[in-house]
Image (cartoon, rainbow, N blue to C red):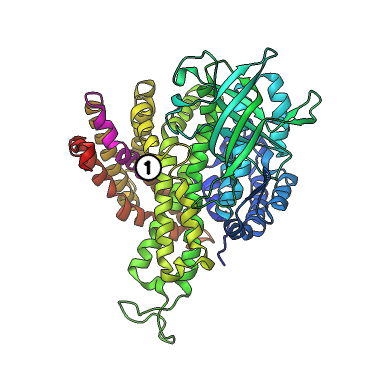
Amino acid sequence: MPSYQAPLREYRFILNELLDVAQYKHLPGFAEAPTDLVDAILEEAAKLAQEVLAPLNAVGDHEGCKLENGVVTTPTGFKEAYRLLVEGGWPSLVADPAYGGQGLPATIGVVFNEMVSSANMAFGMYPGLSHGAYAALSSHGTPEQQATYLPRLVTGEWTGTMNLTEPHCGTDLGLLRTRAVPVGDGSYKITGQKIFISAGEHDLAENIIHLVLARIEGAPAGIKGISLFIVPKYIVRRDGSLGVRNGVSCGNLEKKMGIHGNATCVLNYDDAIGWLVGEENKGMRAMFTMMNESRLGVGLQGLSQSEVAYQNAVTYARDRLQGRSLTGPKEADKSADPIIVHPDVRRMLLNAKSFNEGARALLIWTSLMGDLAHRSDDEKTREFGDDMMALLTPVLKGHFTDRGFANAVEAQQVLGGHGYIDEWGMGQFVRDARITMIYEGANGIQALDLVGRKLAQNGGRGVFAFFRMIDDFLASEAGDEAMKPYLAALASARKDLEAATTWLMENGLANPDNAGAGSTDYMHLMGVTGIAFMWARMAKTAMSKLAAGTTDKSFYETKIKTARYYMDRVVPETATHLARIRTGSDAMMALAANDF
């Protein structure tokens, strides 16, 4: 039976020692989040994740959701777990106090969400999507819409969804056919079909607030003619009570490779009543508020599956006796040594460990930049935070999920044949991780977004600020002899990233296929560089703690050794990514379609 332990020591190290979030206690939200309160929140969140959600992960995988007579039933235990989530106030953690939220920094929500997703990714998608709907409506809804829907989304009494994809269009939303016809009273009749709608129908909450992209009659073709609508499962009366069932129904549950505990629905809209969010034909702007938040959440999911798969692989590797160490028996009193003595097993475990800890630091740091973009009292800090969120969101989504899936596969490999057997749970981590590379914009789309949009945004201000940040750190630590191996690796990665950026700027405009051909390698190059920056900072922090004297010596020494592994074994990949980018698109585009 697989297990999960929340990495609370890691969270405290990142929040309190690496990032020193207490320095922002003068800012809104942070003032309400002193260290002792955050510690208490994380302790309680860990209990929820470990004791309630993790035991239901395999249950959700084996049972799945069921559709009977239009009603979707979630797996055994999910409804009770959701009730505990709501009663604990967890959906309100980072929401606006104006709507009943606790107003804590989004950074704390990211830590909470990683625990939930590691424990039970399919379950975590229900409240996760609701928060995305909350974000879209809080930014683009009318005051009346906000007053009607946000308080119930904040408490978790109602859940939310996003409805983009149709059978004939996924990424190219300009092709969508769902139509909206004005009724004359400010509402619209929505008709069409949406597919792949996560949490689209279920028995966890009394109402579901669907945010639906549709085209108003007579609107321009393509993306420019798309509008966003609120379409609740049950119509909400003026007094906030629920009225009649709306014209939206679940036509089918998708039979999927993974995330069986989440209801992935085909939703049919048949003259369903909806209300416009924001301006006509400006729906994509509103939806992107939700999508950007979701993309960061999906990057988190990639990390979460890497973490839980790694934890279970480590447990197995310490216990499984097989063969002898290449340098002689390590446990001579036993028939064989535990497989953790073998270099190749350690390679797989360290690939995951070094990624998990570095990626977690980068994720939390990026989330902190988002908080500062909204809460800082300094204009330059707000600008930098906004630039980093924009630049790194596609990197975190694409790099984290590609690596997260690869790490889940290697963790499964550690268990050998047992990894392929259901009862050990490793297959579920692999299957659940796989979807993260696909939804909320497939990773190839994230790479194109990074190279095609984010690099040039604001005249390249974001990427140049990223370089300056690394340069400032390298310069500040240049005199520290102990830091030289870490600084050298980071400087090498930074040099490769700058060379790749320059090449794409010079060659991507002349031939857009060059940008497309190199985009995935560039995304991973930036991901490795970002994590290397975090590892260099973590190594410095750990060295400082050891120099000052500590009772937690083993933790900091392990941190330094893990940093060295990432720098020595992973960072050299940046040279390969750069070499591929420089080959351009000729070899990739040489074959005619019929030659494949």
Measured from the top left, where is residue 561 in percent x and y? 39, 59
Q: In the depicted view, which residue is nearer to us: 71 or 149?
A: 71
Q: Is residue 206 visible?
A: yes
Q: Secondary structure at mark 1?
A: helix
Q: Nearer the viewer, residue 101 or 147?
A: 147
Total marks placed: 1
- Residue designated by label 1: 527
Q: Residues within 10 Å of mark 1 (few under 14, many from 20)?
A: many
Q: Quadrant of the C terminus?
A: top left
Residue under the image location 52 percent in, 60 percent down: 552
Image x and y of residue 527, in percent: 37, 42
Q: Amino acid at mark 1?
A: Gly
- In this rendering, would 163 be left or right of 532? right
Of helix, strand and loop, which mostly describes the magenta segment?
Answer: helix
Residue that appears at 73% across and 28% down: 235
Residue 444: x and y, percent?
36, 38
Percent across and percent down for residue 137 are 62, 26
- The residue segment tinted magenta is 509-529
x 66%, y 19%: residue: 142
